[in-house]
């Protein structure tokens, strides 16, 4: 059986993407084809940018897990292998390599060299081969279309609750625990510092989070920023520090995952370490209260 295909980056795999996948499955069944999602592991804009830091909602490994969780049959596209193809060459590749027998695209999709491939081209190319073709309308929240760029903007504003609603799940970070300055330990709030890589978007501020270490999940709060009180940070990227409640293990070098449930406050410069310590106590109480009813 051949494939009904949709193509895109699908950064975030948000509710709009999920709606497109549902349409793909229903239309594939209608045409007696198998649904197949072709995706770019990283956005082409990120790969081409001179400043690719913090531009991605879902990293390649996260995307794989989410596709599997959604039950989506998919294959990754190598951007470098297709970036110079003309629209016709790209279309021929779909026919030959991916057994394409129909195409469904999102309303803002374009492909091929310089994004020269349009819905108009695809509609005509599919018609010439007598293949089904359709364009899915934008999936909207109220009057605003749900898009990866909208969610990036919302995260930059710190509105975790709305970002989570549009994603259809809590925003997450994963990374390896690295050695820090151990200031949190001196203040009574030891933190795990995370290396989350170059591309992942890091919302700035203090957040109520859940943390997976191994197979167990804990409550906690996370600070993402530049440590203005002690001014020890020398990197361009903000530092991710998470305090895990009721946790005393050494986890240096291990990978952990953080899920965000709400923003507690902006990062603040305090006049003293005592003032910072007092605020951390309030942060812990606020996070515990916010997370109390979340399973």
Image (cartoon, helix red, strand yellow):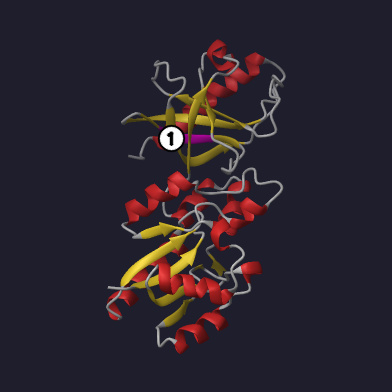
Residue at x 59% of width, y 17% of height:
277
- Considering only vertical position in the picture, is 161 above or below 207? below
Is residue 279 visible from the viewing direction of this image?
A: yes
Chief secondary structure of the magenta portion: strand
The percent coordinates of residue 129 (x first, y second) are 43, 86
Residue at x 59% of width, y 45% of height:
158
- Considering only vertical position in the picture, is 153 above or below 117? above
Residue 182 left/right relative to 131 = right
Q: Which residue is mark 1?
A: 257
Q: Which residues are magenta?
A: 207-211
Determine crowd level at label 1: few under 14, some 14-19, many 20+ residues with C-alpha closer than 10 A. Answer: some
Residue 151 left/right relative to 75 = right
- Considering only vertical position in the picture, is 81 above or below 290? below
The percent coordinates of residue 155 (x first, y second) are 58, 48
- Depth check: give the residue in front, 272 or 139: 139
Residue at x 34% of width, y 28% of height:
214
Q: Quadrant of residue 292?
A: top left
Q: Residue furthest top?
A: 186
Q: Quadrant of residue 108?
A: bottom right
How many numbered dots are placed on residues in this image? Answer: 1
Rendered-image quadrant of the N terminus: bottom left
Residue 182 left/right relative to 164 = right
Is residue 170 visible from the viewing direction of this image?
A: no
The percent coordinates of residue 288 (x first, y second) are 43, 30
Residue at x 40% of width, y 84% of height:
131
- Depth check: give the residue in front, 45 or 240: 45
């Amino acid at each position: 059986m051949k494939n009904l295909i949709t193509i895109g980056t699908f950064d975030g795999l948000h509710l709009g993407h999920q709606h497109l996948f549902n349409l793909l499955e229903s239309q594939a069944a209608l045409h007696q084809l198998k649904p197949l999602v072709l995706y770019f592991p990283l956005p082409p804009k990120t790969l081409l940018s001179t400043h690719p830091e913090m531009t991605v909602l879902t990293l390649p490994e996260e995307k794989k897990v989410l596709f599997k969780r959604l039950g989506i049959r998919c294959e990754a596209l190598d951007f470098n292998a297709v970036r110079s193809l003309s629209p016709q060459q790209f279309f021929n590749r779909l026919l030959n390599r991916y057994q394409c027998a129909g195409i469904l695209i999102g309303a803002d999709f374009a492909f091929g060299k310089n994004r020269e491939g349009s819905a108009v081209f695809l509609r005509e190319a599919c018609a010439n081969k007598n293949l089904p073709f359709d364009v899915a309308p934008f999936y909207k929240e109220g009057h605003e279309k749900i898009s990866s760029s909208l969610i990036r903007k919302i995260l930059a504003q710190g509105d975790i609750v709305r970002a989570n609603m549009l994603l259809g799940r809590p925003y997450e970070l994963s990374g390896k625990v690295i050695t820090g300055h151990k200031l949190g330990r001196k203040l009574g709030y030891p933190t795990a510092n995370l290396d989350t890589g170059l591309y992942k978007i890091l919302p700035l501020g203090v957040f109520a989070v859940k943390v997976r270490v191994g197979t167990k999940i804990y409550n906690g709060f996370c600070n993402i920023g530049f440590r203005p009180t002690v001014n020890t940070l020398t990197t361009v990227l903000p530092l991710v520090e998470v305090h895990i409640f009721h946790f005393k293990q050494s986890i240096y070098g291990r990978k952990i995952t953080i899920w965000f449930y709400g923003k507690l406050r902006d990062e603040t410069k305090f006049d003293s370490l005592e003032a910072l310590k007092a605020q951390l106590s309030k942060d812990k109480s606020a996070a515990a209260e916010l997370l109390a009813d979340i399973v």
